[in-house]
Amino acid sequence: MIEAVSFRLRSLRDRNGWTVADMAERTGIPKRTLDKYMLRSGASLPGFDALCLLSKGLGVSLDWLVFGSEGASPSVELIVERASHAAGRAVFETILREFYAKNGAIVSGERILNLTPEDWAGAVGDYAKEEAAKMIAEGITYEELLNWRNKKLERVHELFVDMVSELLPDVKLPTNLANTKRGTGN
């Protein structure tokens, strides 16, 4: 673990073109101490307080700093998925609301509600960022994220079954699909 933290600190320094003095200024950790953390062999392991200062000062997650990509990946992916879902839903609800309020006149040329696709992408990105920051600030757990994903997948499955039943009323669905629709299955 010590070598991994040391490697990540050196990698971050090199990738950003920082000097150790730059890193010391950003983190408030003395240059000499940072040098010890970044030795190629025999490096010192930063304590918890130092790891927190490094994380905040260098703009990386504590998970990444300590564990690398393996430690943060599943929960980060779920946070991104949930934040993106919330952002997409908010945008499409806005479009639908305006569509009904304006009797369908929401598209003009290459704009939707007078916004370009780039404007919409920026709005979705900003909203997703806010949602992700809120989840992180509230300390959302991996278990909560998995529960959310499972509920979302169940809902998508229900919508699929309903759509198939509506489009193809004469088709008999397999029992496992049909039971889900009627609430008697999984």
Image (cartoon, rainbow, N blue to C red):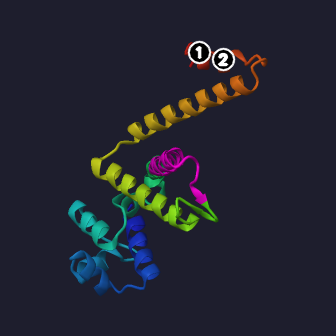
**Residue at 34% across / 49% down in the picture?**
135
Q: Is residue 50 left or right of residue 175?
A: left
Q: Give the position of the C terminus as an image quadrant.
A: top right
Labels 1 & 2 near each other (Cβ < 8 A): yes
Identify the mark at residue 135; answer none if there is no mark.
none
Disc 2 is placed on an element classified as: helix
Residue 132 position, x and y percent, is 39, 53
Q: Is residue 46 left or right of residue 90?
A: left
Q: Which residue bears the numbered disc 2?
A: 178
**Residue at 53% across / 64% down in the picture?**
115
Q: Nearer the viewer, residue 44 or 93?
A: 93
Is 87 magenta? The answer is yes
Identify the mark at residue 182; answer none if there is no mark.
1
Residue 18 versus residue 144 in the image, above or below: below
**Residue at 34% across / 70% down in the picture?**
59
Q: Is residue 65 left or right of residue 177?
A: left
Majority SS type along the magenta span: helix
How many numbered discs, if any?
A: 2
Q: Please, what is the three-letter code of the amino acid marked with disc 1?
A: Arg
Is 97 magenta? The answer is yes
Q: Report the magenta residues as a range.
A: 83-107
Residue 49 position, x and y percent, is 21, 63
